Amino acid sequence: MLNTQQIKEILVEGKILPATEFDQFAKEASETGKKIEDYLIEKKVLSPSSLYENAAKYFKLPFINLKDQSIRKDVLLSIPEPIASTHNLIAFDSDPKSIKLATTDPEDLETFEFIRKKTGLEVKIYLATPESISLGLKQYHKSLKAEFDYLTAETAAISSGAEASDEDLKKLATDLPVVRIVDTLLEYAVFEDASDIHIEPDEKEINVRYRIDGILRHVMTLPKNVQQGISARIKILANLKVDEHRLPQDGRFKISNKEYKVAFRVSIIPTFDGEKIVMRLLREKAQVLTLEQLGLQPKSLEVLKRNIDKPHGMLLVTGPTGSGKTTTLYTVLNILNTPEVNISTIEDPIEYRMSHVNQSQVNTKIGFTFAAGLRAFLRQDPDIIMVGEIRDQETAEIAIHAAMTGHLVLSTLHTNDAVTTLPRLSDMGVPSFLVATTTNLIIAQRLVRKICANCIQSYNLDKNMIAELEKALDLPSIMETLKREKVIVEHQQNVASLLFYRGKGCKQCNNTGYRGRIGIYEILEITPELSEMILKKATETDIKRAALEQHMITMVEDGFIKAKNGITTIEEILRVTKE
């Protein structure tokens, strides 16, 4: 949609409204909480078609009305429906060299470029009214309905509850509508930079959700009769048993073209209403970040660099699933990856390929576990070992003994913060003296969404918000850390005087106010003092107190620094750090 400034320039240049009158209308629209475009149309100052016809002149683009336009099916379907509806655009005509798009937003260059690459055609932009676009979008549903009706006949035997044969399901999986639905789901997930696709059957329909920036977002609802076809199609792609509906199955497949190479990790489980499918997207050529890009504070960065340079010992990264642990480990490995060292990893699964690193995949079916792999590595003369995850006593003991005998060991663990990692290792049966002497550094982390740079705005906390924060957090301690780290100046005594930021919500961030993610960290360096405390089996509380005295920045404090610097919001910090 057009923004307020653009509408003002369009109307003033087109001599439809003088600037003073427009400003008065804008003020009234703001007071009633309405968009200026809707307010002007409601007040009959202008019609949608006159606004967009003048906008077309302003942008030097042709205007199109799709009301009586019949769009060829092949042209319409050249753009996946989710992209068309999310970005308010329609492909309405094409020739061998170009494709014509109607849109309400002529500045959505990223989407136009995506369509150019996808179709291989030159993109010609036309401006249309929102009503015109929504009429075009209805044609998708007519086209899909016809295909779904055809599928209903194909799946009648399966829908009635009869047991379908392997051959029937394979035939269903190759049907063009099923192939197109699955291709659209996968392609759109890559385009939206989703990390997971959830296909969830209900009693009467199928819901599709994507996890984008760590949050699940509903994308589309499909009719129940396509369930068997979609399930069979994904099973064939992932090389799974098509006629197995009662047991969970796991597999993977790849999609690669000039623009991207993505591996999809597939997990299928039986539920009451059918098979639930979750696909994790792993970008094979994921950009390896630098330590600075991870979002570490300067002092934490120094501590990490100091410990990476140590020739032996253990570096642990902790946090729940999906908190960016693997990315942190790969970033560290990338720095250590030089011709002078031999690096071996055992992972489950191998998420990113790294050149000059010997990466092994766990296979429990044949007994190749983390522990078995680690044992084998020690006969391969490694300098650096990465273990995907320490899950049991055997793996923990071998990893710690490897760290004792001159190897640098990197691994991950599932704990809530850095300090609880120490008792977790003790619970696994690892003696305290081994933990104390081999552990160099523990990094606890979470991922928070970054504020969208396109619609960022500042604000002060109100009394209610401050009261909520005081209940949940130790605000005086956080303020002291902000002063110590020179994020705020001495005279800023209370949190009410601080300026924070949030995203207003715009087209670029899908009206969420967020775009992209960054880590918040808690880095615990095992100093001689802390090592002594671990040997004496000090409590978790005592170790944490000592670490804070040594100026360890907690995850919440790191989050507050990033919130104060306009990188993320306080709401995000509370969302990911609440116990």
Image (cartoon, rainbow, N blue to C red):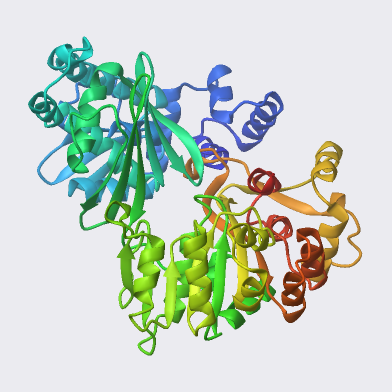
Vertical placement of 475 versus 247: above or below? below
Vertical placement of 49 versus 6: above or below? above
Q: Is residue 422 left or right of residue 546?
A: left
Number of marks: 0
Q: Is residue 434 left or right of residue 511?
A: right
Residue shown at 20%/39% (left/top)?
240
Furthest-top residue in this view: 160
Q: Toward which corner of the image does residue 440 lie, by quadrant?
A: bottom right
Residue shown at 35%/88% (left/top)?
339
Q: Nearer the viewer, residue 149 or 489?
A: 149
Residue 107 visible in rendering:
no
Image location (x, y in percent) of residue 64: 29, 29
Image location (x, y in percent) of residue 170: 11, 30
Residue 143 visible in rendering:
yes
Image location (x, y in percent) of residue 532: 76, 76
Q: Nearer the viewer, residue 112 or 161?
A: 161
Vertical placement of 393 versus 321: above or below? below
Q: Is residue 245 left or right of residue 345?
A: left
Furthest-bottom residue in this view: 340
Image location (x, y in percent) of residue 219: 40, 31
